């Protein structure tokens, strides 16, 4: 079966990859919270 390629502008692709990374980090955080880890509040300035 032949799959045709999609042409996506570089900026759009970069934004999609950022969203995928955020989804992965959210899944990791959810898994840790489900395992009983306590959430820690951190200010953005501390990062």
Image (cartoon, rainbow, N blue to C red):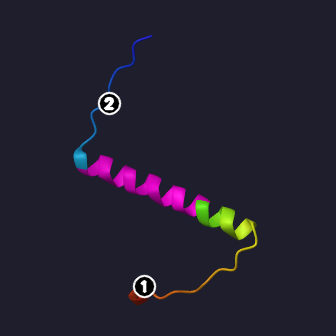
Does residue 8 lie above or below 19 as drawn?
Answer: above
Name the residue located 42 percent from the left edge and 85 percent from the top edge.
44
Q: For residue 33, what is the image quadrant?
A: bottom right
The answer to whether residue 13 is left or right of residue 41 is: left
Q: Residues within 10 Å of mark 1 (few under 14, many from 20)?
A: few
Q: Nearer the viewer, mark 2 or mark 1?
A: 1
Q: Secondary structure at mark 2?
A: loop
The answer to whether residue 9 is left or right of residue 5 is: left
Q: Secondary structure at mark 1?
A: helix
Does residue 18 lie above or below 6 as drawn?
Answer: below
Q: Residue 6: which disc?
A: 2
Q: What residue range appears in magenta? A: 11-27
Q: Position of residue 45 (x, y in %)?
A: 39, 89
Earlier sequence position, callout 2 versus callout 1: 2
Name the residue located 39 percent from the left edge and 18 percent from the top edge.
3
Residue matched to label 1 = 44
The answer to whether residue 9 is left or right of residue 45 is: left
Name the residue located 45 percent from the left edge and 10 percent from the top edge.
1
Q: Main secondary structure of the magenta part?
A: helix
Quarter of the C terminus within the rendering: bottom left
Q: How many marks?
A: 2
Q: Residues within 10 Å of mark 2 (few under 14, many from 20)?
A: few
Q: Position of residue 46 (x, y in %)?
A: 42, 88
Is disc 2 in contact with disc 1, using a CB cutoff of under 8 Å?
no
Does residue 23 lie above or below 41 as drawn?
Answer: above
> Furthest-top residue in view?
1
């Amino acid at each position: 079966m032949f799959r045709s390629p999609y042409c996506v502008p570089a900026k759009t692709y970069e934004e999609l990859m950022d969203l995928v990374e955020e989804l992965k980090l959210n899944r990791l955080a959810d898994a840790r919270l489900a395992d009983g880890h306590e959430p820690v509040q951190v200010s953005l300035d501390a990062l």
